[in-house]
């Protein structure tokens, strides 16, 4: 029996990936949501020339934030 067969061991260690950055879970969730928002923006881009969709996409979140401030001020 040759020496290489006798000393051969099974590699149970996981391979190390160089340059991999481990981010916290909350950061990965934010990045996933931003990816989703970017995908929607790319889908809606042909409709932006009308102006209504762009106005709605900007104004609606702002109105929701203002509504949240109003509701919390009454508490």
Image (tube, grey):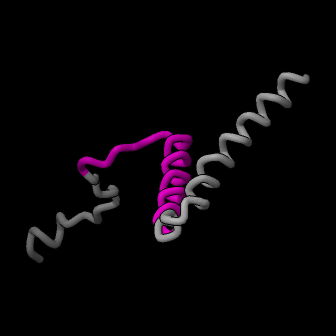
Vertical relation: 14 (above or below) 63: below
Residue 31: horizontal and vertical position, in percent? 48, 49
* Residue plotted at (9% across, 68% down): 3
Residue at the farthest right position = 75
Apparent side of residue 9 relative to residue 52 in the rendered image (left or right): left
Q: Quadrant of residue 26?
A: top right
Q: Is residue 20 visible?
A: yes
Vertical relation: 48 (above or below) 72: below
* Residue plotted at (53% across, 59% down): 36
Is residue 29 or residue 37 the one in the foreground? 37
Apparent side of residue 4 relative to residue 68 in the rendered image (left or right): left
Residue at the farthest bottom position = 1
Residue 38: horizontal and vertical position, in percent? 48, 58
Q: Is residue 1 magenta?
A: no
Apparent side of residue 33 relative to residue 5 in the rendered image (left or right): right
Q: Is residue 39 visible?
A: no
Apparent side of residue 56 relative to residue 48 in the rendered image (left or right): right
Is residue 9 or residue 66 the one in the foreground? 66
Vertical relation: 6 (above or below) 33: below
Residue 28: horizontal and vertical position, in percent? 50, 47
* Residue plotted at (29% across, 65% down): 10
The rendered magenta stretch, by its main secondary structure, is classed as helix
Assign the C terminus to one quadrant of the image: top right
Assign the N terminus to one quadrant of the image: bottom left
Q: Is residue 30 magenta?
A: yes
Vertical relation: 23 (above or below) 8: above
Is residue 34 or residue 21 the one in the foreground? 34
Q: Which residues are magenta?
A: 18-43
């Amino acid at each position: 029996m040759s020496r290489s067969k006798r000393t051969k061991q099974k590699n149970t260690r996981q391979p190390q990936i160089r340059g991999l950055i481990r981010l916290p879970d909350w950061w990965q969730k934010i990045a996933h949501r931003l990816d989703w928002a970017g995908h929607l923006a790319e889908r809606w881009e042909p409709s932006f020339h009308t102006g209504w969709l762009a106005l709605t996409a900007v104004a609606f979140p702002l109105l929701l934030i203002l509504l949240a401030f109003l509701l919390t001020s009454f508490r």
